[in-house]
Image (cartoon, coloured by chain):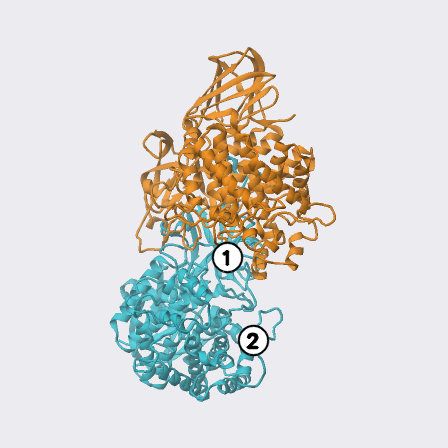
Chain colours: A orange, B cyan
Amino acid sequence: MKYFPVSLEKVSVRNGFWGKRMELARKVIIPLQWKILNDRVRGAEESHAVKNFKIAAGKMKGTFKGCLWQDSDVVKWLEAAAYSLATNPNKELERKIDKLIDLIARCQQKDGYLNTRFTIQDKDKRWCNLCYSHELYCAGHLIEAAVAYCKATNKRKFLDVAIRNADCINKVFGPHKGQRKGYPGHQEVELALVKLYHVTGDKRYLRLAKFFLDQRGQKPNYFETERSGNIVLVSRKEFDDAVRKGGYQYNQSHLPVRLQREVVGHAVRAAYMYCAMVDVGLETADKELIQATKQLWDNLTQKRMYITGGIGSSGSNEGFTVDYDLPNETAYAETCASIGFVFWAHRMLHIEMNGRYSDLMEQVLYNSVLSGMSLDGRLYSYANPLASYPVNGKNSPGSSITSTRQKWFKCACCPPNLLRLLTSLGEYIYSHTENELYLNLYTSSRTKVNLNGRKVVVAQKTDYPWDEKICIDVSPEIESAFTLSLRIPGWCRKVSLKINGRNQKVSEITKKGYARIYRLWKKGDQVELVLSMPIEGVSAQPAVRHNAGRIAIQRGPVVYCLEQIDNGRNLNCVVIPKNTRLKAEFDSRLLGGCVVIKAAAKRHSGDKTRLYGKADDFQAKVVSAKAVPYFLWGNRGEGEMLVWIRET
Amino acid sequence: MKYFPVSLEKVSVRNGFWGKRMELARKVIIPLQWKILNDRVRGAEESHAVKNFKIAAGKMKGTFKGCLWQDSDVVKWLEAAAYSLATNPNKELERKIDKLIDLIARCQQKDGYLNTRFTIQDKDKRWCNLCYSHELYCAGHLIEAAVAYCKATNKRKFLDVAIRNADCINKVFGPHKGQRKGYPGHQEVELALVKLYHVTGDKRYLRLAKFFLDQRGQKPNYFETERSGNIVLVSRKEFDDAVRKGGYQYNQSHLPVRLQREVVGHAVRAAYMYCAMVDVGLETADKELIQATKQLWDNLTQKRMYITGGIGSSGSNEGFTVDYDLPNETAYAETCASIGFVFWAHRMLHIEMNGRYSDLMEQVLYNSVLSGMSLDGRLYSYANPLASYPVNGKNSPGSSITSTRQKWFKCACCPPNLLRLLTSLGEYIYSHTENELYLNLYTSSRTKVNLNGRKVVVAQKTDYPWDEKICIDVSPEIESAFTLSLRIPGWCRKVSLKINGRNQKVSEITKKGYARIYRLWKKGDQVELVLSMPIEGVSAQPAVRHNAGRIAIQRGPVVYCLEQIDNGRNLNCVVIPKNTRLKAEFDSRLLGGCVVIKAAAKRHSGDKTRLYGKADDFQAKVVSAKAVPYFLWGNRGEGEMLVWIRET
């Protein structure tokens, strides 16, 4: 069976939780990030990204500035803007993008090569340091953007640029004599090539994606070969440092991808690679590849994932360490890694439409993805720790993680990544087969799909995740039999389902996390789904030493945290007694309106000049604790924050 | 009132807890470290320290190798050996040292300068990079060693070398025109100069020590001046990195020493400086200096000290961070810092003979100092974390702290430092005034002192800290009235004191932590002191977030820990129920004989594929937990270790 997402342009997301955020993305974030990429926002870290294109195009004098992957910031923004155009046409924005595409196109070399860093300087060093150069990474993002823009506008110019670029890559890399046997140091181009295959139907791109995947981890390691050759970008010392930090596990080239069973190394690289493994696996019916992704999925979700869905616990490799190693203050949980995790979960879901994948997608979206930006969309976080104890602008003493979100970054991968996920979020809500429509995410939205050749309009109205009720309006153009499948979240222990006011027995029709309603649908059918959201005190696996004796508060898909502004300093002095009543309350004036959780708790304190003593020296008094959604933390100034709260 | 330690040569420490360790120092560690300093131990990090002297003396060809302070390893070893000779003459060792002194003397330049690094290379760069050069630091250790060797053997040669060296320094540095106004980047020479003053009576050395202290932290910062001048040893980038890591706080030159109220920066630098502040303060009756040390003491002991007495919680600056920031797995708590803390506590004690200082001295000695070496004296630790979760040879994922003790280090400051403390430990046990003898530490030992002009022999016999009873034999040459003051440790809640079998009321005679027994003593008087050692579950100040909901087990001065070898993996799954009975048991076969603590505890576990769930998913079963003295951890192979244990 083949499963497909209902594509972006067929889904309108208005109002509701995500609708409001997507509107923010269109109205505020797209213009803001464009300004930043053009260095027109004061106090933001210099981008220079658009300037690099101007310089490479010969329209401006200057030198390349920024990270090796600086180009990708621009095309990721372009991709995000394209998604926005797909659902919300905007002539002004489109003109702006067309101009940008003209600029990008002028940077393309005769052979199709396109990368400002290696056009402005080191022209002779192309492709010779794949481990670090990010040339293939940037190309991947360019391809994704081009595909998105073509789909949104039907304009081919940028797609043609991308095709010439892909053809250039396809010439340089491959199994034949004279072709390089390498693969990217940062995965990304693989999944982009599959997208290009989808839009062009040209199998060469699929084959190249598969080639890159299958070359990875072969012996001798390609990067090792490179290293003994022409190291242009990093010194031997830097390389050795990197290897010491985790060797080829860092970029998942330690083993052939099919043999990988543990998620290791840099989390974003990993997530993008797993995406491509599913893509190629599904397209080529390669069971081995699919099986590997399932085992990697289990390792990640059973042993190496924060409750927020954040992944990659360590800052030193921006990635994974060992099973159950999930420190909170130093949690890296990069925003991009969470986004990559959503991409991956979305692909896993389409292997078999199992709620375990859409559950995770939801968990990551509502928590560690959204925590990556401020409520107003103007500030971003790179790392998303689960506890903060601010000292000198850092998240904890000696940490490299800032205690507040920033306007921009030297390495600015996260903000445009978040933007492209937000503007394409419509694509994650519904999936379908020929005769079945799946509701993966609940949020006010509307889609028009073909089921058994008949047009059907399905509309959700809900204040989810604050409210438990989802009203679904099902309107086929004519009476028609098909299956409407509603995700029943794993966290939900009590579900009520009514069709046209009549109760349905959910458990009987629920399979793999979806309640599958097969019936003859007619115009105006009303489905009412109520997903009970009792407040849960979640415990972690005891082997997670950082959370021992602690609980996290969760309501529905939303994880909560304590903040200093509500609970005072020293949040670790707050203890929630076992079985205390946790009360949910919607506060319309707080943080754009959200459900807060209140609980009677205890707070320990005592003589501050006494460092050690008997338990009695440090008495507890009763206090009222207030928790807010984790993703909203840090929107009211700098202060302590804590997800895992002590419990007695 | 002036208080003095009963000096080394007057105290014989035999058998008992410390006697055994001092014997190990003489028989095993002194010869072993000599071999290592001569690069004759396989598998140990290269020292090259003695070779540097041979090269500088022109007896060997070669280049300087090692840290800028490599010389100090040799003279610290020499100092340690000298202490050993003071109580245990050893002709062979003395001959070896005399040869070494000949070698060192040959390295001295005509003007008295003595430092192999700046003799072998960069002769023209002497004294021009005090911030990093460690020239004054090495000179300080040389002076300390020379003083110790002269006292032990009455031989003057090395002392004369040290005097010429000190005179050279005194010529270069000082308030007069043409003299440098600088001071050491790593404090040490200040306290050494006071020792040199004591042994020579030459006030110039005391004045120079005071000059160095008072110059420190004046504006403009001397190191800043240097930086804009001739930076020979570190690049601008390295300097800026260091400044970013804590600026001049790093070497305590951020403020004049008299104005310092918080312990900041590199912990060893800090401790040595505080020592010198007390030394100079007492010698010059400088109340301001003494007052500053008291406030620094309070800040350290009330807010920035581990329960083991370890200080300097962060590896990034090898030092202090902020109040109550005492992480356990990443605890640096450098062995040298603990040793410096003992030096400082010993000096504070002689300001006013207050038990608060000797209590700390004991706490540090029995825990974070001794943890710095293996039971057999052959392996050493640099950092002394309070929890270990070994991954790939490190203490925790991503940590720079090794999970086991090492043979030697690139920067090998700690092992010879530990050795010189061990061989001079006799000096810490007793103190006196003209008519009062203080017992600061309890351990089998014997001293002969003059009190009111009469010779008195006092001998302790005890298995402390395993046993609670200390038998003290007091034998004045003739019947004589004086005060015998016995420290009553702060941790002790029940004391029994008998003189010649008759009970004494301790509380009535106890003042500032010492039970002061004034009486007419006669030969053969027997004092029996019993310091009850119930096992305590110690809580930390709630503001120490890392220890929230946890207790540390302590019995007498000894802090305990759980080890994997006794309790299995995942020590954070072990929970000790509140008010559980903790049972002490002496195990003569374990780790050289020690008291272990046993307790009925609970251990949480559950489905290992489940990362998050309800509390019920992770059940607890009853287990027996066994704790061993913290200082003995890691003597039975690599494994997890935990001091702060969860409590319910």
Query: In front: B408, or B227?
Result: B227
Q: Which residue is mark 1?
A: B628
Residue A524, position in %: x, y?
48, 12
Whether residue A72 is visible here, answered yes or no, is yes
Query: In front: B635, or A332?
Result: A332
Mark sitting on residue A539? none
Classify residue B308 by image quadrant. bottom left
Instruction: Kindly identify the amino acid type of the residue bearing the numbered disc 1.
Output: Val
* Mark with earlier residue (1, 2): 2
Mark sitting on residue B48? 2
Residue B71, position in %: x, y?
49, 77
- Please give left or right for residue B293 compared with residue A426 in the image: left
For residue A620, above or below residue B273? above
User: The residue marked by circle 2 belongs to what chain?
Assistant: B
User: The residue marked by circle 1 belongs to what chain?
Assistant: B
Residue A244, position in %: x, y?
58, 57
Query: In front: B352, or A551?
Result: A551
Seen at 38% across and 32% down, the residue is: A582
Quadrant housing the C terminus of chain B:
top left
Instruction: Kindly identify the amino acid type of the residue bearing the numbered disc 2.
Output: His
Classify residue A271 by image quadrant. top right
